[in-house]
Amino acid sequence: MKKYNVAILGATGAVGQEFLKLIEERNFPYNELKLLASERSAGKTIDFMGKTFTVEEAKAASFENIDIALFAGGSASKTFAPEAVKRGAVVIDNSSAFRMDPDVPLVVPEVNPQAIKDHKGIIANPNCSTIIMAMALKPIYDKVKIKRIVVSTYQAVSGAGKEAIDELTDQVQAIIQNRPVEANILPSAGLPVHYQIAFNLIPQIDVFVEGDYTKEEMKMVHETHKIMGDSTIGISATTVRVPVYRSHSESINLELEGPLSASEAKTLLANFPGVIVQDDPAAQIYPMPLFTSGKDEVFVGRIREDKSVPYGLNLWVVGDQIRKGAALNALQIAEYMIKHNQI
Protein backbone atom coordinates (compact mmCIF):
# COMPACT_ATOMS: atom_id res chain seq x y z
CA MET A 1 0.00 0.00 0.00
CA LYS A 2 1.18 3.49 -0.81
CA LYS A 3 2.20 5.60 2.17
CA TYR A 4 1.70 9.33 2.56
CA ASN A 5 3.57 12.23 4.09
CA VAL A 6 1.32 13.65 6.81
CA ALA A 7 1.45 16.92 8.74
CA ILE A 8 -0.62 17.61 11.86
CA LEU A 9 -1.17 21.29 12.63
CA GLY A 10 -2.04 21.75 16.30
CA ALA A 11 -0.30 18.53 17.31
CA THR A 12 0.00 19.42 21.01
CA GLY A 13 -3.74 20.10 21.57
CA ALA A 14 -6.54 17.67 22.41
CA VAL A 15 -7.56 17.03 18.79
CA GLY A 16 -3.94 16.82 17.63
CA GLN A 17 -3.20 14.23 20.29
CA GLU A 18 -6.30 12.30 19.25
CA PHE A 19 -5.05 12.31 15.65
CA LEU A 20 -1.90 10.55 16.82
CA LYS A 21 -3.82 7.93 18.82
CA LEU A 22 -6.06 7.19 15.85
CA ILE A 23 -3.21 7.02 13.34
CA GLU A 24 -1.68 4.29 15.48
CA GLU A 25 -4.95 2.49 16.26
CA ARG A 26 -6.12 2.46 12.64
CA ASN A 27 -2.69 1.71 11.15
CA PHE A 28 -2.96 4.77 8.94
CA PRO A 29 -0.48 4.48 6.03
CA TYR A 30 1.89 7.35 6.74
CA ASN A 31 5.45 7.57 5.46
CA GLU A 32 6.75 10.71 7.13
CA LEU A 33 5.00 12.54 9.97
CA LYS A 34 5.48 16.22 10.73
CA LEU A 35 4.09 17.69 13.96
CA LEU A 36 3.36 21.42 13.85
CA ALA A 37 2.11 23.95 16.38
CA SER A 38 2.41 27.59 17.38
CA GLU A 39 5.71 29.19 18.32
CA ARG A 40 4.77 28.72 21.99
CA SER A 41 4.64 24.92 21.64
CA ALA A 42 7.54 24.53 19.21
CA GLY A 43 10.40 22.48 20.59
CA LYS A 44 8.22 20.14 22.66
CA THR A 45 8.86 16.46 22.09
CA ILE A 46 6.20 13.79 21.57
CA ASP A 47 6.86 10.06 21.73
CA PHE A 48 4.88 8.21 19.09
CA MET A 49 5.14 4.62 17.89
CA GLY A 50 8.66 4.15 19.19
CA LYS A 51 10.02 7.45 17.88
CA THR A 52 10.51 10.86 19.42
CA PHE A 53 9.19 13.74 17.34
CA THR A 54 10.06 17.39 17.91
CA VAL A 55 7.17 19.77 17.39
CA GLU A 56 8.02 22.46 14.84
CA GLU A 57 6.65 25.97 14.58
CA ALA A 58 4.15 26.06 11.72
CA LYS A 59 5.32 28.05 8.71
CA ALA A 60 4.27 28.09 5.08
CA ALA A 61 7.36 26.09 4.14
CA SER A 62 6.39 23.39 6.66
CA PHE A 63 4.02 21.93 4.07
CA GLU A 64 6.60 21.21 1.38
CA ASN A 65 6.34 17.54 0.27
CA ILE A 66 3.24 16.95 2.43
CA ASP A 67 0.43 14.88 0.92
CA ILE A 68 -2.18 15.16 3.71
CA ALA A 69 -2.39 18.02 6.21
CA LEU A 70 -4.64 17.40 9.21
CA PHE A 71 -5.56 20.69 10.86
CA ALA A 72 -6.78 20.37 14.46
CA GLY A 73 -8.63 23.70 14.34
CA GLY A 74 -8.13 27.30 15.37
CA SER A 75 -7.29 30.59 13.72
CA ALA A 76 -4.12 29.22 12.09
CA SER A 77 -6.25 27.43 9.48
CA LYS A 78 -6.96 30.61 7.52
CA THR A 79 -3.26 31.39 7.34
CA PHE A 80 -1.83 27.99 6.56
CA ALA A 81 -4.52 26.06 4.63
CA PRO A 82 -3.99 28.05 1.39
CA GLU A 83 -0.22 27.75 1.82
CA ALA A 84 -0.45 23.97 2.24
CA VAL A 85 -2.69 23.64 -0.83
CA LYS A 86 -0.29 25.80 -2.84
CA ARG A 87 2.43 23.24 -2.05
CA GLY A 88 0.33 20.26 -3.17
CA ALA A 89 -1.20 19.06 0.10
CA VAL A 90 -4.82 18.15 0.69
CA VAL A 91 -5.98 19.95 3.83
CA ILE A 92 -8.64 18.41 6.09
CA ASP A 93 -9.55 21.26 8.40
CA ASN A 94 -11.27 21.03 11.76
CA SER A 95 -11.82 24.78 12.21
CA SER A 96 -14.89 26.76 11.19
CA ALA A 97 -12.87 28.84 8.70
CA PHE A 98 -14.02 27.12 5.50
CA ARG A 99 -17.15 25.17 6.45
CA MET A 100 -19.65 27.43 4.72
CA ASP A 101 -17.41 28.26 1.75
CA PRO A 102 -19.34 27.01 -1.31
CA ASP A 103 -16.08 25.79 -2.87
CA VAL A 104 -15.17 23.66 0.18
CA PRO A 105 -16.89 20.30 0.80
CA LEU A 106 -18.25 19.85 4.33
CA VAL A 107 -18.08 16.13 4.94
CA VAL A 108 -19.20 13.36 7.27
CA PRO A 109 -17.94 10.27 5.39
CA GLU A 110 -20.89 8.04 6.32
CA VAL A 111 -23.35 10.76 5.28
CA ASN A 112 -22.08 12.62 2.18
CA PRO A 113 -18.81 11.10 0.93
CA GLN A 114 -19.76 12.03 -2.64
CA ALA A 115 -18.93 15.66 -1.81
CA ILE A 116 -15.24 14.88 -1.33
CA LYS A 117 -14.44 14.57 -5.04
CA ASP A 118 -15.33 18.23 -5.62
CA HIS A 119 -12.61 19.58 -3.32
CA LYS A 120 -10.13 22.20 -4.48
CA GLY A 121 -7.49 21.29 -1.92
CA ILE A 122 -9.45 21.91 1.29
CA ILE A 123 -12.10 19.70 2.90
CA ALA A 124 -13.88 20.95 6.02
CA ASN A 125 -14.73 18.91 9.08
CA PRO A 126 -18.12 19.96 10.48
CA ASN A 127 -18.76 21.20 14.00
CA CYS A 128 -18.65 18.36 16.53
CA SER A 129 -22.33 18.67 17.50
CA THR A 130 -23.35 18.74 13.84
CA ILE A 131 -21.40 15.57 13.06
CA ILE A 132 -22.98 13.69 15.96
CA MET A 133 -26.48 14.78 14.91
CA ALA A 134 -25.92 14.09 11.20
CA MET A 135 -24.97 10.49 11.95
CA ALA A 136 -28.37 9.91 13.56
CA LEU A 137 -30.32 11.89 10.95
CA LYS A 138 -29.00 10.34 7.75
CA PRO A 139 -30.67 6.89 7.77
CA ILE A 140 -33.98 8.44 8.82
CA TYR A 141 -33.76 11.23 6.23
CA ASP A 142 -33.04 8.74 3.45
CA LYS A 143 -36.18 6.80 4.37
CA VAL A 144 -38.79 9.50 4.98
CA LYS A 145 -37.21 12.97 4.67
CA ILE A 146 -37.19 15.37 7.61
CA LYS A 147 -39.45 18.41 7.80
CA ARG A 148 -38.23 19.95 11.07
CA ILE A 149 -35.58 19.39 13.75
CA VAL A 150 -35.56 20.75 17.30
CA VAL A 151 -32.28 19.91 19.00
CA SER A 152 -30.95 20.68 22.47
CA THR A 153 -27.33 19.81 23.18
CA TYR A 154 -25.57 18.94 26.42
CA GLN A 155 -21.94 19.64 25.57
CA ALA A 156 -18.91 18.52 27.53
CA VAL A 157 -16.36 21.05 28.79
CA SER A 158 -13.58 19.48 26.73
CA GLY A 159 -15.25 21.10 23.73
CA ALA A 160 -13.87 24.37 25.11
CA GLY A 161 -10.33 23.01 25.48
CA LYS A 162 -8.00 21.76 28.20
CA GLU A 163 -8.41 24.98 30.20
CA ALA A 164 -12.15 24.29 30.60
CA ILE A 165 -11.45 20.73 31.75
CA ASP A 166 -9.01 22.03 34.35
CA GLU A 167 -11.44 24.71 35.49
CA LEU A 168 -14.22 22.17 36.08
CA THR A 169 -11.85 20.07 38.18
CA ASP A 170 -10.61 23.09 40.13
CA GLN A 171 -14.14 24.32 40.81
CA VAL A 172 -15.36 20.93 42.07
CA GLN A 173 -12.37 20.70 44.40
CA ALA A 174 -12.95 24.27 45.63
CA ILE A 175 -16.59 23.52 46.44
CA ILE A 176 -15.70 20.30 48.27
CA GLN A 177 -12.97 22.11 50.23
CA ASN A 178 -15.23 25.11 50.93
CA ARG A 179 -12.94 27.50 49.04
CA PRO A 180 -14.01 30.39 46.78
CA VAL A 181 -14.84 29.26 43.24
CA GLU A 182 -13.07 31.00 40.36
CA ALA A 183 -14.50 31.16 36.84
CA ASN A 184 -12.30 32.45 34.00
CA ILE A 185 -13.11 30.29 30.96
CA LEU A 186 -16.81 29.55 30.36
CA PRO A 187 -18.95 30.34 28.43
CA SER A 188 -15.92 31.57 26.46
CA ALA A 189 -12.57 32.93 27.62
CA GLY A 190 -12.91 36.05 25.46
CA LEU A 191 -16.22 37.16 26.97
CA PRO A 192 -16.45 39.81 29.72
CA VAL A 193 -18.48 37.60 32.11
CA HIS A 194 -17.65 34.05 33.18
CA TYR A 195 -19.77 31.55 35.07
CA GLN A 196 -19.12 28.56 37.27
CA ILE A 197 -19.68 25.28 35.41
CA ALA A 198 -19.34 22.91 38.38
CA PHE A 199 -22.84 21.79 39.43
CA ASN A 200 -24.28 24.20 36.87
CA LEU A 201 -25.43 24.43 33.24
CA ILE A 202 -24.55 27.34 30.96
CA PRO A 203 -26.99 27.93 28.06
CA GLN A 204 -24.41 29.73 25.95
CA ILE A 205 -21.73 28.24 23.71
CA ASP A 206 -19.80 30.83 21.67
CA VAL A 207 -21.09 34.38 21.15
CA PHE A 208 -24.64 35.54 20.50
CA VAL A 209 -25.55 36.48 16.95
CA GLU A 210 -28.66 37.66 15.12
CA GLY A 211 -31.95 36.71 16.76
CA ASP A 212 -30.19 35.95 20.08
CA TYR A 213 -29.07 32.52 18.92
CA THR A 214 -25.46 31.61 19.59
CA LYS A 215 -22.89 31.04 16.88
CA GLU A 216 -22.77 27.36 17.92
CA GLU A 217 -26.52 27.02 17.43
CA MET A 218 -26.41 28.58 13.98
CA LYS A 219 -23.49 26.33 12.99
CA MET A 220 -25.78 23.35 13.61
CA VAL A 221 -28.44 24.90 11.37
CA HIS A 222 -26.30 25.97 8.42
CA GLU A 223 -23.90 23.01 8.48
CA THR A 224 -26.72 20.45 8.65
CA HIS A 225 -28.37 22.06 5.61
CA LYS A 226 -25.09 21.86 3.68
CA ILE A 227 -24.22 18.28 4.68
CA MET A 228 -27.72 16.93 3.98
CA GLY A 229 -28.00 18.97 0.80
CA ASP A 230 -31.41 20.20 1.88
CA SER A 231 -31.97 23.78 3.02
CA THR A 232 -35.73 23.25 3.39
CA ILE A 233 -35.36 21.42 6.72
CA GLY A 234 -36.53 23.64 9.58
CA ILE A 235 -33.93 23.54 12.35
CA SER A 236 -33.96 25.13 15.80
CA ALA A 237 -31.03 24.51 18.15
CA THR A 238 -30.26 25.30 21.79
CA THR A 239 -26.70 24.49 22.84
CA VAL A 240 -25.79 24.09 26.51
CA ARG A 241 -22.49 23.49 28.31
CA VAL A 242 -22.74 20.88 31.05
CA PRO A 243 -20.31 19.73 33.79
CA VAL A 244 -19.20 16.60 31.93
CA TYR A 245 -15.58 16.07 30.87
CA ARG A 246 -16.05 14.36 27.53
CA SER A 247 -18.78 13.31 25.03
CA HIS A 248 -21.62 15.52 23.83
CA SER A 249 -25.26 14.52 24.23
CA GLU A 250 -28.21 15.72 22.15
CA SER A 251 -31.96 15.54 22.55
CA ILE A 252 -33.37 15.56 19.02
CA ASN A 253 -37.04 15.93 18.12
CA LEU A 254 -37.90 15.23 14.49
CA GLU A 255 -40.99 16.06 12.49
CA LEU A 256 -40.91 13.77 9.46
CA GLU A 257 -42.50 14.00 6.03
CA GLY A 258 -44.13 10.58 6.40
CA PRO A 259 -44.77 7.75 8.84
CA LEU A 260 -41.90 5.96 10.58
CA SER A 261 -42.38 3.88 13.70
CA ALA A 262 -39.89 3.83 16.57
CA SER A 263 -39.23 0.18 15.75
CA GLU A 264 -38.45 0.98 12.12
CA ALA A 265 -36.18 3.85 13.21
CA LYS A 266 -34.25 1.52 15.53
CA THR A 267 -33.64 -0.90 12.67
CA LEU A 268 -32.52 1.86 10.31
CA LEU A 269 -30.12 3.29 12.88
CA ALA A 270 -28.76 -0.10 13.94
CA ASN A 271 -27.88 -0.87 10.32
CA PHE A 272 -26.16 2.47 9.69
CA PRO A 273 -22.33 2.40 9.77
CA GLY A 274 -20.84 4.11 12.79
CA VAL A 275 -24.06 4.09 14.83
CA ILE A 276 -24.84 1.84 17.81
CA VAL A 277 -28.39 1.63 19.14
CA GLN A 278 -28.60 1.36 22.94
CA ASP A 279 -32.30 1.35 23.65
CA ASP A 280 -33.90 -0.91 26.24
CA PRO A 281 -35.93 1.19 28.69
CA ALA A 282 -37.02 -1.83 30.73
CA ALA A 283 -33.37 -2.62 31.47
CA GLN A 284 -32.44 1.07 31.85
CA ILE A 285 -30.15 0.91 28.82
CA TYR A 286 -29.52 4.18 26.99
CA PRO A 287 -26.43 6.14 25.91
CA MET A 288 -24.50 8.21 28.46
CA PRO A 289 -21.30 10.27 28.16
CA LEU A 290 -19.61 8.23 30.85
CA PHE A 291 -19.66 5.14 28.64
CA THR A 292 -19.28 6.68 25.18
CA SER A 293 -16.06 8.61 25.88
CA GLY A 294 -13.16 7.14 23.95
CA LYS A 295 -15.51 5.29 21.57
CA ASP A 296 -15.60 5.81 17.80
CA GLU A 297 -19.31 5.28 17.29
CA VAL A 298 -22.30 7.55 17.81
CA PHE A 299 -24.82 6.01 20.22
CA VAL A 300 -28.59 6.44 19.92
CA GLY A 301 -31.31 5.57 22.43
CA ARG A 302 -34.64 6.73 23.92
CA ILE A 303 -36.08 6.26 20.41
CA ARG A 304 -39.79 6.92 20.66
CA GLU A 305 -42.65 8.33 18.66
CA ASP A 306 -43.81 11.89 19.32
CA LYS A 307 -47.61 11.84 19.16
CA SER A 308 -47.91 15.64 19.36
CA VAL A 309 -47.34 15.92 15.59
CA PRO A 310 -48.49 13.67 12.72
CA TYR A 311 -45.07 12.08 12.10
CA GLY A 312 -42.84 12.75 15.10
CA LEU A 313 -39.82 10.99 16.54
CA ASN A 314 -37.58 11.60 19.56
CA LEU A 315 -33.94 10.52 19.79
CA TRP A 316 -31.24 10.75 22.45
CA VAL A 317 -27.82 10.83 20.78
CA VAL A 318 -24.38 10.73 22.43
CA GLY A 319 -20.92 10.78 20.88
CA ASP A 320 -17.31 11.51 21.76
CA GLN A 321 -16.82 14.96 20.28
CA ILE A 322 -13.03 14.68 20.21
CA ARG A 323 -13.15 11.38 18.32
CA LYS A 324 -16.07 11.18 15.88
CA GLY A 325 -16.82 14.85 16.41
CA ALA A 326 -13.33 15.90 15.33
CA ALA A 327 -10.20 13.79 14.84
CA LEU A 328 -11.81 10.51 13.74
CA ASN A 329 -14.09 12.18 11.19
CA ALA A 330 -11.11 13.98 9.64
CA LEU A 331 -9.04 10.82 9.48
CA GLN A 332 -11.96 8.92 7.95
CA ILE A 333 -12.08 11.53 5.19
CA ALA A 334 -8.40 10.88 4.46
CA GLU A 335 -8.98 7.11 4.52
CA TYR A 336 -11.89 7.46 2.09
CA MET A 337 -9.74 9.50 -0.29
CA ILE A 338 -6.96 6.92 -0.15
CA LYS A 339 -9.36 4.05 -0.76
CA HIS A 340 -10.91 5.82 -3.77
CA ASN A 341 -7.63 7.11 -5.22
CA GLN A 342 -8.56 10.73 -4.63
CA ILE A 343 -5.15 11.78 -3.27
Image: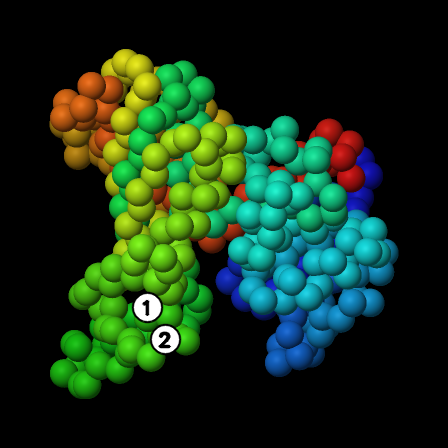
Q: Which residue is drawn at 44% across and 20% down?
A: 142
The image quadrant that residue 286 belongs to is: top left
In the displayed structure, 219 sits above or below 271; it is below
Q: Nearer the viewer, residue 316 or 33?
A: 316
In the displayed structure, 24 sits above or below 188; it is above
Numbered disc total: 2
Category of crowding for the residue at label 1, using alpha-carbon neighbours closer than 10 angstroms: few (below 14), some (14–19), many (at least 20): many
Q: Which of 134 and 206 is in front in this view?
A: 206
Which percent across, then down, holds residue 28?
68, 44
The quadrant of the image that shows the N terminus is top right
Residue to which mark 2 is pinned? 191
Q: Which of 227 and 184 is in front in this view?
A: 227
Q: Which of 77 and 48 is in front in this view?
A: 77
Asked if residue 303 can be seen in this view, the reply is: no
Which percent across, then down, holds residue 2?
82, 39
The quadrant of the image that shows the C terminus is top right
Marks 1/2 in contact by CB < 8 Å: the verdict is yes
Asked if residue 104 can be seen in this view, the reply is: yes
Q: Residue at x 31, y 55 (%)?
A: 211
The image quadrant that residue 139 belongs to is: top left
Q: Distance between the residues labelled 1 and 2?
A: 7 Å
Category of crowding for the residue at label 2, using alpha-carbon neighbours closer than 10 angstroms: few (below 14), some (14–19), many (at least 20): few
Q: Is mark 2 on a helix, strand or loop?
A: loop
Q: Is 134 situated left or right of 343 in this image?
A: left
Which percent across, then down, holds residue 244?
29, 58
In the displayed structure, 302 sits above or below 121; it is above
Q: Which kind of residue does numbered mark 2 sit on?
A: Leu
Q: Which kind of residue does numbered mark 1 sit on?
A: Pro
The numbered dot on residue 187 is 1
The numbered dot on residue 196 is none
Q: Which residue lies furthest to the front in this view?
A: 210
Q: Residue furthest bottom?
A: 180
